[in-house]
Image: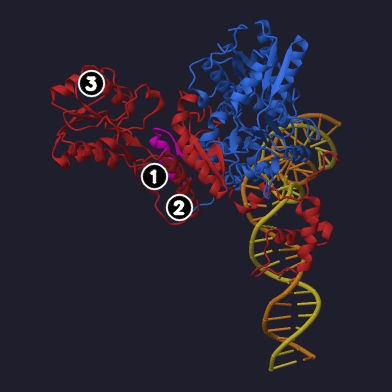
Chain colours: A blue, B red, C orange, D yellow
Amino acid sequence: MTGARRRVTQQDIARMTGVSQATVSLVLNGRSDADVKLSAETREKVLRAIAETGYVADPIARRLAARHNRIIGVFTYEPVFPSANSDFYHPFLVGIEQQAEVLGCDLLLMTSTPVVDGRRRLFQGDNRLRLADGSILLGRTIDRADLARLLAEEIPFVSIGRRDDAGGPVPYVGADYAAATAEIVRRAVALGHDRLAYLGLGAGPESWADRGRGFREAVASAGVYGGHFAPPAEGEPVRDTAAVLDAALAAGVTAVVAEEHADGVALFELARSRGVALSVATLGEPTRAALPTAVEFTSLRIPRQAMGAQAVEVLTALIEGTPGDRQRLLPCEVVSGETLSERGN
Amino acid sequence: MTGARRRVTQQDIARMTGVSQATVSLVLNGRSDADVKLSAETREKVLRAIAETGYVADPIARRLAARHNRIIGVFTYEPVFPSANSDFYHPFLVGIEQQAEVLGCDLLLMTSTPVVDGRRRLFQGDNRLRLADGSILLGRTIDRADLARLLAEEIPFVSIGRRDDAGGPVPYVGADYAAATAEIVRRAVALGHDRLAYLGLGAGPESWADRGRGFREAVASAGVYGGHFAPPAEGEPVRDTAAVLDAALAAGVTAVVAEEHADGVALFELARSRGVALSVATLGEPTRAALPTAVEFTSLRIPRQAMGAQAVEVLTALIEGTPGDRQRLLPCEVVSGETLSERGN
DNA sequence: TCAAGGGGCTAATACGAATTAGTTCAGGAA
DNA sequence: TTCCTGAACTAATTCGTATTAGCCCCTTGA
């Protein structure tokens, strides 16, 4: 009714109840302990006025003064929601939201930076990252320089996905691709395969490098042959599946471990259509995009939801200075599908 | 390098260059126009110092002074991400994010309220709604009392989905279900149907009431018969599809308009399996859940993404006091599927 | 020689909450 | 009566930036 009314402040509450702004602040923060004493009467008077007016502390002012506001920032280099990435981000966000709810934090999606060339800029003029107590960074790859700067400026953050040091250890919650890949190799070996190959880059971004390393180490320790077929370029899907298949067969390879799910699916389908026995395991999560196959692929189940939730945990530990691991690798479950079978089948 | 260094402030820059903090602020905001004059020399001195130190304005302080934070709250009664609702909310969020990005706003997901009985409480002790400059409310139904309170407290908000007045007009961006339903009825009539029926509640929450009204009015104005089959209870799917079909046939109905997509699908499939000719149109969006059918249903395409985007527009207009509609109904496209056909087919 | 009129800058204050160093007052001890 | 102590508050300051009123000095015109 009283159009364009200013927001209610502690000062207003103070005037209403005849106390000082400081008292209101003390009541709000439940500071009756130790050195600060407040009468129950005053406390209730203030509390009543707060309830009446529906007062809420301005998070901005609060953050300026107290250095925290129970807001967790979520930064994604790509838009969070738009369709292409939604399947990718969604499970992480489920976990993040869940844990944020448990902790009573709100989530600030940093959408204010326009997407340029398909990526958002983490640092730009007005760095909104500081709006939140700390942030979670989400993205297939994260700019190394950005990480270094975050560390240097001591902005609390946690990366989802393992990251190499960037002028210091990067807090992260990642998936243990190396271990999972090694496990797949062991299974293949146990099924009689002794000539394996890795299809993918196996290098570059940490998540690929980890898989590649897992493969190489497992192959070495099992004492079997481990070949390598690289895609045309980083991030590119394998174009010439036929060439890969031919090369693999020529090298006597009987089991292929594919970095990208789609590549593995394509290879397996081609082999099957040719009537060739080739085992294929995939180091990615079966996605809807690659669903036309009815076959259940041997692949990985990445604990995305748990990763999201734990990222929030690590972040709060970081903010509050609680001890604990700042780097966590969660195990990936190996989905035992039908595509990794006994040698010769 | 110099661990735990305080962040650089305008004050620091000022000291370095021998000017005042105010001058630094003026330079930063490019305020050389109009009433404020700065010499090119001073400007450059300051700019140089800024470049050297890598100074960036603290967004928090900036907002505090500016009295608004360019944060848009997004409140959902149910968790945003968890799977069951994700298909429902997702398209809206795509639109919201998109528009927020255009406007340079961040999105605050209100996740701090624990979900009780599957719903979040909009109003509770510390009302985080005021964290944002304004908020968007999302949900199939929204508590009437909540709306009234929001209006009374003059908290800027926009509802996604039309809402009846709640002690005043509620700002909303909704889908024009009434018009779309009427259009479907007209198409049915044009195809020779003169005995139609509505399957659903056609009352209660605005979105259903609008559909029901659209049906009744269109049927009346076309001068044809319009029956009504209600589900067992509000929100319940129709249990006894067979009973509905029998009743419809007994009443000589040749075309049914179903409020819920799933109900329509079930009815159509049953009729087809019995070899009975029955046209069915659906007043919902074809969802993945009801996909087992290969038939393309005559149904509605709800402009969810546009609704999200426009909600942001309305909200900012509201916040900034710009003139413009506070209530918008966007047209729904009628998907001409195969299930609404000429009478007798 | 003085007022008027800028240009160029600064002091002061606001923004809203948190925090610290007091201050006031009542009651008890000396 | 004075001193002390603790309870219950408050005044003042801080956080970093934006903004406004106004100051000082140098021209210019009369």
- Residue on which disc 2 sits: A2
> In the image, residue A14 lies at what x, y percent?
60, 45
- Residue on which disc 3 sits: B271
Residue B152 is a magenta residue: yes
| Span highlighted in magenta in the image | B137-153
Foreground residue, B159 or B237? B237
For the residues tagged 3 and 1, is the chain the same? yes
Chain that bears disc 1? B
Contact check, label 3 and label 2, Cβ < 8 Å: no
Dot 1 falls on a residue whose secondary structure is loop
Q: Is residue A142 visible?
A: yes
Which disc, if any, is residue B170?
A: 1
Foreground residue, A335 or B214? A335
- Amino acid type at circle 2 is Thr
> In the image, residue A289 lies at what x, y percent?
51, 27
Task: Note whether C2 is above or below B58 in the view shown.
Answer: below
Residue A132 is a magenta residue: no
Left or right: where D29 falls relative to A7: right
Dot 3 falls on a residue whose secondary structure is helix
